[in-house]
Image: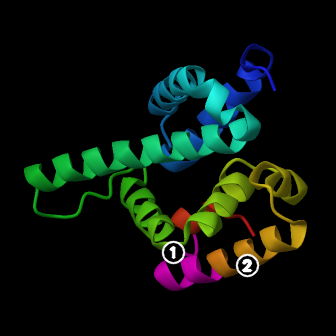
Amino acid sequence: MSFDDDFDELAALAYRAAFRVLGSRSEAEEVAQETMIRALVRWRRVRSHGRAWVCRVAVNEAIGIIRKRRTMELSETPARAGGQDGAGDRIDLQRALLTLPRRQREVLVLRYLVDLPEAEVAEELGIGLGSVKTHAHRALAAMRIALPDHHSGPLEAFDV
């Protein structure tokens, strides 16, 4: 896997993951750009698992933006800021994702936020197809418990 050869695909993955979390094209573009800069700097170390690494970094960057936004909203207003763009739902989604074990979170992000087929998720993470299915099943069950009132909203990202 060469950085130059796979740049377009990696950038698209980063954008897609960030957009699914943030819901903002401009913020997702910024996250994708930052992610690709980080990937270029670290490419020798991460190229063997480049796709998974790029997705993970993009989602973490998006989470950071939501946390900063939430902190600013809380300091400006004591009431919860849900906003028309679903920011409150996305914050709930991120909090729920962060409670999952790392592998379950990686599987959900790659499978449902980045829309990779199960076989590609298994390949990217270096685990078996059965493990992907098990991690996804357990993670989705945990998300439904963590977000019981969100049958639409944040859980719609996991269109299952």
Q: Are marks 2 and 1 in contact (CB under 8 Å)?
A: no
The amino acid type found where label 1 is placed reads: His
The residue drawn where x is 66% and y is 52% is 113
Q: On the image, numbered disc 2 is attached to which residue?
A: 137
Looking at the picture, does residue 21 appear above or below residue 7?
below
Q: Residue 22, percent across and down?
A: 47, 44
Colouring method of the image: rainbow
The residue drawn where x is 45% and y is 43% is 62
Looking at the picture, does residue 55 appear above or below residue 78?
above
Q: Under tag 1, what secondary structure? A: loop
In the rendered image, residue 94 lying in the magenta stretch gets the answer: no
The residue drawn where x is 64% and y is 55% is 109
Q: On the image, numbered disc 1 is attached to which residue?
A: 150
Mark 2 and mark 1 lie on one chain; the one further toward the N terminus is 2
> Left or right: 79 with respect to 151?
left
The boundaries of the magenta stretch are 141-152
Q: Is residue 143 visible?
A: yes
Mark number displayed over residue 1: none
> Left or right: 82 with respect to 137?
left
The answer to which of 131 and 86 lies nearer the viewer is 131
Report the quarter where the N terminus lies. Answer: top right
